[in-house]
């Protein structure tokens, strides 16, 4: 029987590359593959694109108020062996539930690829839903610049690190970029300055009160 799988990691961990490889493997064996992504992900237009410019056209893009169970989408996935869903952290919890239903009721394999957390380290709503619904979960990792495994997606705007701004800001648009960091490097580069000094001052005051 089919199931819902979630493949996740930080930026640059190879999530979209894995999707493209999975697409190739399924197509090689003659299976119908349906590729989808959320409309909010404008990178690549109507394609999924990895960092070395490999790409594949999506069958459809879905908005936050759309349903995978609408007639037009059900028609698109009819006869599919697998649905490959890129940037799945941007799907709504209801849409994640629908993908789970599609897997277990229609017997269509569903594989979602996405981020675990946003640039502040907070899980996306779609990711939280996937951790609840996904039958299988696989983490892809990438090394931080220091050599440790990265677990944060640090945001830069105009080449300056920030913890402010909208939750959704697409990599490569409006001078936004991301760097995968381990916790220590996130503290060093992103929390550096006033925040770090504030916490150290609190520690000193607490120690003095003992």
Image (cartoon, rainbow, N blue to C red):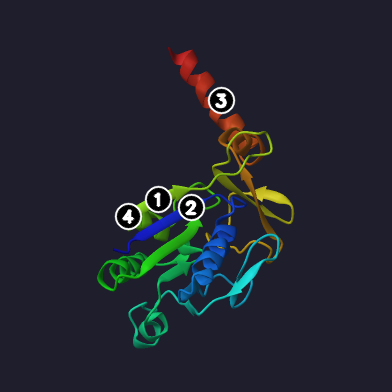
Q: CA distance from mark 3 to mark 4?
A: 45 Å
The residue where tag 2 is placed is 8
The residue where tag 4 is placed is 135
The residue where tag 3 is placed is 201
Q: Nearer the viewer, residue 24 or 49?
A: 24
Is tag 1's residue or tag 3's residue first in the polypeptide sequence? 1
> Residue 206, how many percent across, how many down?
46, 19
Mark sitting on residue 76: none
Mark 3 vs mark 4, foreground winner is 4
| Mark 3, other Cα within 10 Å: few <14 / some 14–19 / many ≥20 | few
Indicate the secondary structure of the residue bearing disc 4.
loop
Residue at (51% x, 63% y) in the render: 87
Mark sitting on residue 137: 1
Residue at (74% x, 56% y) in the render: 158
Indicate the secondary structure of the residue bearing disc 2.
strand
Q: CA distance from mark 2 to mark 1?
A: 8 Å
> Residue 20, how many percent across, how many down?
57, 64
Q: Residue furthest left?
A: 105
Is tag 3's residue or tag 4's residue first in the polypeptide sequence? 4
Residue at (56% x, 36% y) in the render: 183
């Amino acid at each position: 029987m089919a199931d819902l799988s979630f493949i996740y990691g930080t930026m640059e961990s190879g999530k979209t590359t894995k999707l493209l490889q999975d697409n190739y493997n399924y197509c090689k064996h003659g299976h119908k593959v349906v590729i989808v992504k959320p409309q909010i992900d404008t990178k690549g237009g109507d394609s999924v694109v990895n960092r070395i410019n490999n790409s594949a056209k999506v069958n459809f893009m879905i908005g936050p108020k759309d349903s995978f169970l609408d007639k037009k989408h059900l028609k698109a996935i009819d006869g599919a062996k697998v649905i490959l869903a890129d940037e799945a952290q941007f799907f709504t919890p209801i849409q994640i539930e629908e993908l789970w239903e599609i897997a277990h009721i229609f017997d269509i394999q569903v594989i979602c690829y996405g981020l675990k957390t946003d640039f502040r380290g907070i899980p996306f709503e779609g990711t939280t839903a996937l951790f609840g619904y996904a039958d299988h979960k696989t983490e892809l990792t990438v090394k931080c610049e220091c050599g440790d495994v990265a677990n944060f997606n640090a945001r830069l705007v105009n080449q300056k690190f920030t913890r402010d701004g909208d939750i959704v800001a697409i990599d490569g648009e409006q001078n936004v970029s991301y760097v995968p960091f381990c916790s220590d490097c996130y503290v060093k580069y992103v929390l550096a300055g006033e925040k770090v000094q504030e916490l150290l001052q609190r520690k000193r005051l607490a120690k003095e009160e003992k």
